[in-house]
Amino acid sequence: MIAGDAHSLDPQSTVTPDRRLRNWILLANVLAWVAIIVAVRWLFF
């Protein structure tokens, strides 16, 4: 993980937008799983 970031010498690289995009994707993934669990429990229980 650290070695992957070490190749960039530019301090204004695309690390921040990539990290922000990754955070949004993770949040969407968590919300999707919660919605799936709620839907399954609502349908079957």
Image: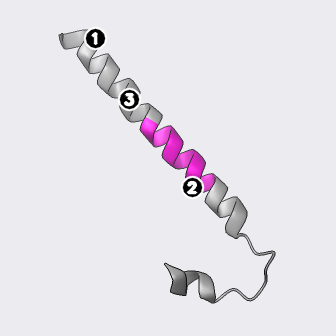
Mark 3 crowd level (few <14, some 14–19, many ≥20, 10 Å Cα): few
**In this rendering, position of residue 15 left or right of residue 11:** left
Callout 3 secondary element: helix
Using the image, determine if residue 21 lies above or below residue 29: below
Decide: few, some or many residues near mark 2? Use Cα within 10 Å; few <14, some 14-19, many ≥20.
few
- N-terminal of the pair, mark 1 or mark 3, is 3
Marks 3/2: CA–CA distance: 18 Å
Disc number for residue 42: 1
**Amino acid tagged 2:** Arg
- For numbered disc 2, what is the local secondary structure? helix
Q: Amino acid at mark 3?
A: Val
Residue 4 appears at what percent x and percent y? 54, 83
> Which residue: 62% across, 60% down?
19
Query: How far is the residue under mark 1 from the one under mark 3?
Result: 12 Å
Could you say which disc has been placed on residue 22 in the image? 2
The residues tagged by marks 1 and 2 sit, at their Cα atoms, a distance apart of: 30 Å
